[in-house]
Amino acid sequence: MPQLKIAIVPVTAFQQNCTLIWDSETSAGVVIDPGGDIDRVEAAIAQNGIDVQAIWLTHGHIDHAAGAMDLKDALGVDIIGPHIADQPLLQGLEDQARMFGLDGAVRNCQPDRWLKHGDTISIGEHRFSVHHCPGHAPGHVVFYNEEANFAHVGDVLFAGSIGRADLPGGNHDTLIASIKTTLMSWPDEVQFICGHGPASTIGRERATNPFIINS
C-alpha cells in the first residue's frame, strides 16, 4: 500500500501545526487546520506537489480555522469537519478575530460537510476513522488511521500536556474522558500529530503525561 507523507507548516502567532498529508504515489492529499498564513500553506503545497482534495478541520478555534475559507477559494475544494457542535465557533470567527485585533482579516467558516463520531474519511486508499472528542471545544474531532498507526488529534492531547479546557465550550472532565475513552484505547505504537508542538506516541503519553497519570 502507498505510504502517507506529512509536512507541518506552523502558522500564525499561535504557531499552530497546519498539517499537509498526502499519498506518496498519487500525491492526493488534504490540508488539516489552515489557521492562517495561507500564502505559506500554498507554498508548501506547491513545493511538495500535493494535489489537495479537501480541507479537514479538527475544531473551530481561530488558530485552526481562520484561513479555511480563503484556502477553499484558492484551491476549489470542500471543507470537511468538524462536528456540528462547533458551528457557533466557526460562525463566530470574525468575533474571535476582533478580540485579537484582527478586524477584517478573518472570515466566518461554513463547512461543506459536518462530521460525526464513527464517520470515515479518506486520502486515496488511506482511511481515517473520525472520533468526536469534546472538552477542548464542543465539536472537536480527531482522525485515526489504524493501518498506519497514525492519528491527528488537534488540541485534545499534546506531548506532555493536554488541551485547554477554560475556553468557551470547554470542560476539563469532558476532555479527560475523551482522552481516556478514545485516545488511550489505541495501541502504544500509534504516533500522533497535535495542534501545537512536537509529535508523540500514545504509549509515551500513557506512561509519562502527568495529566493522564494523575487523573
Image (cartoon, rainbow, N blue to C red):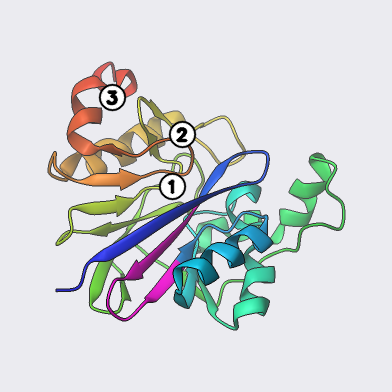
Q: Residues within 10 Å of mark 1 (few under 14, many from 20)?
A: many
Numbered label attached to residue 163 = 2
Which percent across, then down, holds residue 90?
Answer: 64, 59
The amino acid at mark 3 is Ile
> Nearer the viewer's eye, disc 3 or disc 1?
1
Would you name the residue on which mark 3 appears?
212
Which percent across, then down, holds residue 124?
Answer: 29, 79
Would you name the residue on which mark 1 appears?
154
For label 3, the SS is: helix
Q: How much space separates mark 3 and mark 2, taking CA atoms?
A: 12 Å
Q: Quadrant of the C terminus?
A: top left
**Image quadrant of residue 179?**
top left
Name the residue at 14% across, 38% down: 188
Q: Horizontally, is 35 left or right of 199 in the view?
A: right
* Residue 182 visible in this rendered orientation of the protein: no
Q: Residues within 10 Å of mark 2 (few under 14, many from 20)?
A: many
Q: Residue furthest front?
A: 47
The amino acid at mark 1 is Gly
Q: Residues within 10 Å of mark 3 (few under 14, many from 20)?
A: some
